[in-house]
């Protein structure tokens, strides 16, 4: 009888540990599924003489004039490439947007040409994002 009780206790401990592991694994999976890690949107347009790639993650807010970027959420970014000309924009630790043009170093103060390219990109992005939204009836 003592052997049976001892074995029963060991079996219960083993089952209890397995259940704990399964519950812990489910909690971890639920946490990972609830996060948007790595979630991004990519839009690619290619024709014979035209190439455009838009990629963004997080919340990207354009200004009212729709010619610039007002805000990018923490961890978010925006990449725009059109016919080999490109820029990347992301937030720094202080909430200021940093830009990289054509793979060069970071820029915080934009030249007129860079401002014009961003304005062109914003208009193109707004147009392409509108195509992704379902039509309202």
Image (tube, helix red, strand yellow):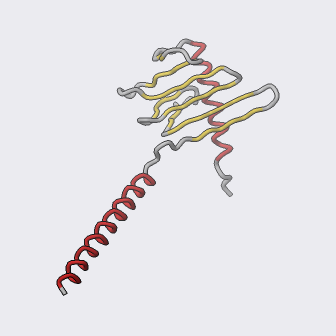
- The residue closer to the viewer here, 117 or 86, is 86
Which quadrant is home to the C terminus?
bottom right
The residue closer to the viewer here, 131 or 51, is 51
Where residue 68 appears, as percent x and y from the top left, is 54, 26
Q: Nearer the viewer, residue 19 or 1?
A: 1
When the figure is inspected, residue 11 is found, relative to residue 93, above or below; the finding is: below
Seen at 59% across and 18% down, the residue is 102
Q: Is residue 124 left or right of residue 60?
A: right
Residue at 25% over, 79% down: 8
Q: In this view, does 127 lie to the left or right of 111?
A: right
Q: Is residue 37 left or right of residue 123?
A: left
**Residue at 64% across, 25% down:** 120
Residue closest to the far left: 2
Is 129 placed above or below 78 here?
Answer: below
Q: Residue 56 sits in which quadrant? A: top right
Q: Where is residue 128 in the image (x, y as percent from the top left)?
A: 67, 38
For the N terminus, which image quadrant?
bottom left
Q: Position of residue 101 (x, y in %)?
A: 56, 18
Q: Which residue is drawn at 65% across and 43% down?
A: 130
Against 132, residue 100 (above or below) is: above
Residue at the extreme bottom of the image, as rendered: 1
**Residue 49, picture quadrant:** top right
């Amino acid at each position: 009888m003592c052997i049976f009780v001892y074995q029963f206790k060991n079996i219960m401990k083993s089952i209890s540990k397995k259940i704990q592991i399964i519950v812990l694994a489910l909690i971890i999976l639920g946490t990972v599924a609830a996060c948007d890690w790595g979630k991004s949107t990519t839009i690619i347009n290619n024709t014979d003489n035209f190439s455009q790639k838009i990629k963004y993650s997080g919340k990207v807010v354009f200004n009212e004039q729709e010619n610039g970027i007002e805000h990018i959420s923490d961890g978010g970014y925006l990449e725009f490439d059109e016919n080999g000309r490109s820029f990347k924009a992301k937030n720094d630790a202080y909430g200021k947007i940093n830009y990289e043009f054509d793979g060069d170093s970071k820029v915080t103060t934009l030249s007129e040409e860079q401002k014009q390219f961003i304005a062109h990109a914003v208009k193109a992005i707004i147009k392409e994002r509108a195509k992704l939204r379902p039509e309202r009836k």
